[in-house]
Amino acid sequence: MVHLPAVAQGGGDCGSKDDTTDPAVCPTPSGRPWGDLCGGRGGFAWEEAEQEEPEQCDPREEDDPPGVAVGDHVVVVNAAKLGLSEKRLDTKNYYKHSGYPGGLKTVGLREQIATHPDRVIRAAVWGMLPHNKLGRQLIKRLKVYGGAEHPHTAQTPEPVAK
């Protein structure tokens, strides 16, 4: 049996039987805040994604083990307000396949922003993360919303300065 440090297990005394606080509202065991709030500032998509991705990986402390997801959550609002060039809106495509012959579906970036703007940011950030177990754990900490409102106000995410 592998014993991970309390930080990796989500340890601490949050959610214990004698504690009346909600485990979802407890701060992270290392004392860091729950997450950061990033807003769609009208910048280009790659600039937005670069602004959000390092928040999940980079500011590692000395006692954080490598290969364990211990970063903050990132909440992105106003994902529909990305500033993209007209050429990029017309040429970028997203592909998915149903698994059946002839089941390739293509969605243009303009249509994707109109219907699911959160998927554009999520795909850009996912392209920068490692495509393994660690990357899948990190992408779960990314919360993207097309509008200005989000359901994470109870966790009091701190706005990220540009």
Image (tube, rainbow, N blue to C red):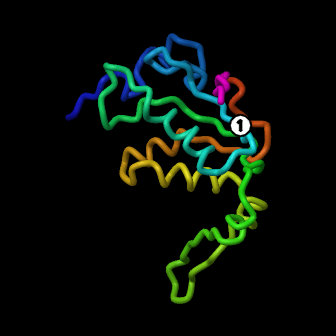
Q: Position of residue 138 (x, y in %)?
A: 46, 41
Is 78 situated left or right of 13 in this image?
right
What quarter of the picture does the N terminus occupy?
A: top left
Q: Quadrant of residue 98?
A: bottom right
Residue positioned 66% across, 71% down in the render = 91
Q: Residue at x 71, y 37 (%)?
A: 39
Q: Residue furthest top?
A: 18
Task: Tell me if residue 158 is in the magenta stretch.
Answer: yes
| Vertical arrangement, residue 102 with respect to residue 40, above or below | below
Residue at point 35% right, 21% down? 6
- Quadrant in the picture for the C terminus: top right
Examine the image and state in which quarter residue 123 appears.
bottom right
Q: Is residue 91 left or right of residue 27?
A: right
Name the residue at the left extreme.
1
Q: Is residue 90 above or below residue 100?
A: above
- Residue 140 percent location from the top left of the image: 52, 43
Q: Is residue 17 left or right of residue 105?
A: left
Is 7 magenta? The answer is no
In the rendered view, would you say 92 is above or below 59?
Answer: below
Q: Nearer the viewer, residue 90 or 153?
A: 90
**Magenta residues (range):** 155-162
Counting every numbered tag in the picture gives 1
Please provide percent x and percent y for residue 88: 67, 64
Percent position of residue 148, x then y: 79, 38
Residue at the spot of label 1: 39
